[in-house]
Amino acid sequence: MTTVTSEETMRTDYTSRLKDHGGLIALAIILVFNILVTPNFLHTQTLAVNISQVATIAIVAMGMTLVIATGGIDLSVGAVMALSGALAPLIFLSDFGQAYPVLGLIAALLFPLLAALVCGMFNGIIVSVLKVQPIIATLILFISGRGIAQVLTNGNLQTFSNPEFSYLGTGKILGFPFQGWLALAIACLLFWVVNRTIFGRYLLAIGGNERAARLAGGPVRGVKIGAYVICSVLSGLAGLIVVAINSASDAARNGNLMELDAIAAAVVGGALLQGGKAPIFGAILGAVIIQLVKYTLLANGVEDEVALIAKAAIILAAVYIQQARKE
Amino acid sequence: MAPLLTMTGIKKHFGGVPALRDASLEIEPGEVHALIGQNGAGKSTLIKILTGLYRRDEGEVEFAGAPSHLSSPRGAQSAGIATIYQELNLVPLRSVSENVVMGQEPKSFGFMINWPEAHRRTREILSRFGIEIDVTAPLGSYSTAIQQLVAIARAVSMDAKLVIMDEPTSSLDSSEVEILFGVVRELKSSGVSVLYVSHFLDELFQICDRVTIMRDGKTVGCREIADTTKLDLIAAMLGRNADEIEAEGLTELAGGSAAFDEVVLDVDHVATGPRLSEFSMSLHRGEIVGLGGLLGSGRTEAARSIFGLDPLTSGTLRLNGREFKPAEPSEAIRARIAFLTEDRKAEGIVPDMSVRENLTLALLPSLRRNGQIDREREKELVSEFIRKLGIKTSHMDQPIRELSGGNQQKVLLARWLATKPDILILDEPTRGVDVGAKREIQAIIRTFVDEGHAVILISSEFEELVEGANRIVVMHEGKSVSELTNPGITENALVRALAHHEDATP
């Protein structure tokens, strides 16, 4: 038996507390700073703006968290957003969509998500059946997905006026943006999936020890494909929200660099890149922190480029805390 | 002549667990010296100390007439100790020449690599071993045997005085083995010593001069090959008395398992690859069949073939009379087969998950209720097994990595018992487990078969095998070669059976 000295115990306590609550502590610091410094921070308007912007990051980050939990990564989320965002206006602006507005609207919601699902299947199969490293496998759609979206739209910006569709990005329930509620609902659903279902248990087991999970009869391929599919469908949904917010679809910009924000949010939220952990609400926390840092710097007149550096610093801090835990 | 290498009184602990208690090794210049021992005897730890990967806790090392610290791989290398590993540490995409001269390239004008000279030198070294190949081709385009020889050539070019070969023939075919032996003899005649680690005893009699035997972290003997026999070596490795075995005479290996008449599993000439080429056995209800054999004899591969881990290339499995072809472990589990792996860390536990989650991992499909895991039933099951198997854990949600090895093993055993299997395959069920837990695990296995189920037991501990099994299928080089049946099962009979087949190998 090894004896642990009190000093070591204290250190472990300290680092584990930092690991468990690091995100919340960071959030508290940012909030206090903003309340003191940023003008009008406690205004409901400010809150609404931040919620509407954080929702897309959070939705994608939750999907990313599931993929990371299997020990994988998905670089194609931004490209899938562009693809699904490009498809929606194409559908409801088509002759069919104009002739049957209701059917057109339903199709404009369903088909892009279906396309995203196919993208997820593609990623999942390449990773789990062909055993290609996730970073390379998802690089394929990272590169080609946005290309396909731009080809579909001839590289044009598609603008539209469709209030029903735009509700997705501009609607409000109880004064708060619709997509905020949507993100919250998805979080509750995924939390249940991860913690209560057999799929969730296998997901964590595969990330924790894939060979052990397989020997225990775990459907390794199916679960991995499932994680990539969920991640892609959520990305597709986020793509639709962005288009709805802007009442315009720009395949070149929709979801640009989203993969980095999503990975950062997942990691800040406590996901381990080697797999085995899927903190869904952590992903939301991570997304909120990243969004608030962006907003704080913007509201205080700091340039966008500097915001990128701040984002990097957050990731660095999150990774440091993870490393400290391992030792 | 003074020995080239003398290691005496070497001790090494890993976190309180002794890996080497008292190891010694002496190698003469120009000698081919074998090192043998069962799994866990301490061979690889000793080699890692010799090559500077580990630091010894205690003991003396003298190399080439001077005390040696061997504190780093680089230091050992420059002292003249070269190691040829099973997984070669060469660069397959670069040319043969580059691999041989790497780190000591011939230069022209002091900064450019003189390739013609490098090729010439490489060809010269290789031709000493009778190998003529295109040295400008990438190393990876050649067979494993050639790659291994290139690694040896590299060692020679670095003026190695001692070349360590760790299981060098395990991936070679018989003609390649002959080429390798030629190289070993050439090394010997040029005064280089070779430390030859292998579990193929026949090979030792072909090329080694002396053999050092290790058991339980100690060196238990050093013999002249000419004065020893395979039976003697196997007995020493296992800690048995060779004379006693000899005196006992041939045991009648009469067959017939009258008490067990209901066949549950019938394995007929199953092969999955080079490591399992012909495996046949039958298993009856209420019976424990042991798989006996030395390291590398194909016991684990035999278990994997039944559990759907390695696809069959030929032969058939019959489960309760019906043909059975599992492509995945999940299919085997559905057919009520369970497999406790020998490698608890790599294939058994999910370290960050709780005792509860680890225990029910193989059981999840049957815990489904309304689309989710039936948590009440899960908890009931887990507490039942914690109680029944006496698993020591502070609570069922404690991470399994915090448990002792014996308790982790009990959780894994519970994982499989909970699936209510008909056939339980146990690969080294008590390895790395303390004596108390070992007795408990053995009692659990006994209860399981008494309930009318069947067990296939793999163990390197002959005592466990002999005491536990109703019948022992002896494996040798990927084949099931004979069977011991009660009342003929004794440890000595098993050692004899193994030695017999070692002798029979051409």
Image (spheres, rainbow, N blue to C red):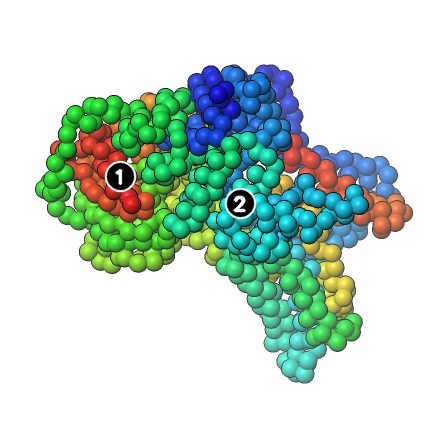
Residue B387 visible? The answer is no
Where's the C terminus of chain A, which quadrant?
top right
- Residue at the (33%, 22%) spot, across then down: B436
The extreme left residue here reads B258
Depth check: give the residue in front, A282 or B60: B60
**Outermost residue toward the right?**
A301
Distance from label 1 to label 2 (Cα)? 33 Å
What's the chain of the residue with tag 1? B
Query: Where does the image place residue B159, in percent across and percent down from the top left?
Result: 59, 35
Give the camera-side residue of A246 and A12: A12
Reading the image, the residue beneath label 1 is B503
Q: Is residue B190 visible?
A: yes
- Tell me which numbered mark, 1 or 2, is placed earlier along the sequence: 2
Query: Who is closer to the viewer here, A327 or B158?
Result: B158
The residue beneath circle 2 is B128
Dot label at residue A319: none
Please give left or right for residue B462 compared with residue B9 in the image. Answer: left
Q: Are marks 1 and 2 on the same chain?
A: yes
| Residue type, mark 2 in image | Arg
Looking at the image, is mark 1 or mark 2 nearer the viewer?
Answer: 2
Badge 2 crowding class, 10 Å Cα cut-off, few under 14, some 14 to 19, many 20 or more, is: few
Which residue sits at x=66%, y=48%? Answer: B118
Q: Is residue A236 above or below residue A105?
A: above
**Label 1: few (<14), some or many (≥20) within 10 Å?**
some
User: Based on the displayed image, in which of its 4 quarters is residue A155 positioned?
Assistant: bottom right
Give percent across and percent down for residue B29: 49, 27
The image position of residue B187, as x and y in percent, is 50, 37
Specify the amino acid type for callout 1.
Answer: Asp
Which subunit holds the residue at mark 2? Answer: B
Q: Secondary structure at mark 1?
A: helix
Percent across and percent down for residue B95 are: 62, 52
Residue at image coords 75%, 76% = A154
